[in-house]
Amino acid sequence: MNQPHVAEQGETITVESWNLAVKAEVAALGWQTALTRPPRVQITSETIRSEATKVVSLKCKPSKVPVKSFVFPEAPAWLQALEEKKQKVLAGPGMEGTADEPEPRKSPKKVTHIRPPGDVIKLQDRLYYLLQPPLESLVSSGALEFPFEPFPYQFEGIAFLYPRHAAVMADEMGLGKTMQAISAMRMLLRAGEIRSVLLICPKPLVTNWKREFSLWAPEIPISVIEGDSAKRNWLWRSQETPVRIANYEILMRDQELIQSGELAFDLVMLDEAQRIKNTASTTAEIARSIPRTRSWALTGTPIENSTDDLVGIFEFLAPGLLQKGMAIKGMSQTAGPYIIRRTKDVVMKDMPPRLYRDAEVYLSPAQQESYEIAENEGIVRLEGMGQELTVQHVFELVLRLKQICNFDPVTGDSSKMEQLKADMEEVAASGKKAIVFSQWTRTIDHIRKHLEPFGPLEYHGKIPTKQRDGVIDQFK
């Protein structure tokens, strides 16, 4: 390496490049070998002169096992009843108050436990749900009385709703969403986890909800918010009943009171929740403004037109969870834990078999003649319309022919009616009941005359709302 030079005054310095390359070598320090070197073991040999066995004792310090303890709230009412009944069985005749040899019980075919949702993080909260008894035991033990034993998929629906603060039950129509929701609410109320429930539904369904509550939760008082402004105001504020039912129109009328912040509920449930699919609608805005702890939604059609419909529902359940324009896969993964949906083809194995019988019924001579006349005249009329012909005109002809297949407009003959009367005689003889459907009220008038010996009841749009419950009760 070049030595540095100190310049004197007036001296010119020429700068040369210095060679800074330093040769480096890896020095073997031995620590790598030390890491792989086996531990040094010192062996001491000792001769045992006596025949007695020499015992060497080693002192081992016990390790402390971490233990966590939790104090849960008082057991739900149904669990207490279940334990009481168990004790009575064990202390029954011949048992002498002991539980040494309890009578064996057949285990249910399927066991449904309440599973904590994924957003429950605390171990204590998760254990609380996991330690609850299976729902099937509530029915078999009589801890909670049910008019009919729910199907397995309905137990799953109850177990899904019970622990969730935000949930959508989107079962296909006819699978019992109402019963599952009422049973879950009933269990929460009996457990003391909720004290006030607001159920919002379309106006025509209010009486149906009242009837279902009286069937599946007869011990729970309910009130319907209706009447003039003063009465509704009192019903909104009253704490006498744990469940209050209001229709969507009432929300519009009492918007000021609802959005004042004076009301609060532990659970708000929307039936036919597609009513709030439009986030900009006044109904959706009012529903979202209700102070609440839990939010449930029931709908058989969570997506009617586009995925934005689901976004509107989730703005009530979990604001901000979904956004418009999200990819379908991402929306499905995000909303999946909050939704339960079953269709009839999926749960058909859990339901009793459905029998179909297609009966071929031939038109009577009078019906056949009227049918051919109407068909020929209708076709001639359609052909003569030319450019004015529309699909609606064709539907009108088809509708006319369908009506003739029910009853001949001239003589009143009906092959279908003769077959129906024969079937009804068989039903009545077996002590069963039957429901006869028709899309025309005039046809119902004809049917009623022929079925008078069987005491028919009518239920259709022309029956006053106040009389419909009586018809259903009488049919039961």
Image (tube, rainbow, N blue to C red):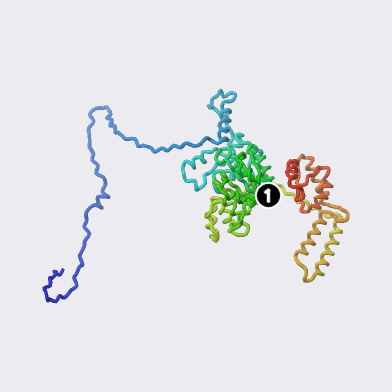
Q: How many marks?
A: 1
- The residue at the point 59 percent across, 37 percent down is 138
For residue 186, which quarter of the picture?
top right
Of residues 10 and 273, the one nearer the viewer is 10
- The residue at the point 79 percent across, 57 percent down is 402
| Crowd band around label 1 with a 10 angstrom C-alpha radius: few (<14), some (14–19), many (20+) | some
Of residues 172 and 260, the one nearer the viewer is 260
**SS at circle 1:** helix
Above or below, comparing residue 409 to residue 165 in the picture? below
In which quadrant will I find the C terminus? top right
- The residue at the point 27 percent across, 50 percent down is 36
For residue 79, which quarter of the picture?
top right
Mark yes or no: residue 345 visible: no
Q: Which residue lies most toward the left here? A: 8
Above or below, comparing residue 116 to residue 399 in the picture? above
Mark yes or no: residue 449 visible: yes
In which quadrant will I find the N terminus? bottom left
Residue 93 percent coordinates (x, y) = 60, 24
Q: Name the residue carrying label 1.
A: 203
Residue 397 percent coordinates (x, y) = 80, 62
The amino acid sitting under disc 1 is Lys
Of residues 236 and 461, the one nearer the viewer is 236
Residue 235 percent coordinates (x, y) = 63, 43
Residue 273 percent coordinates (x, y) = 62, 52
Task: From the viewer's perspective, tell me whether residue 435 is left or right of residue 311.
Answer: right
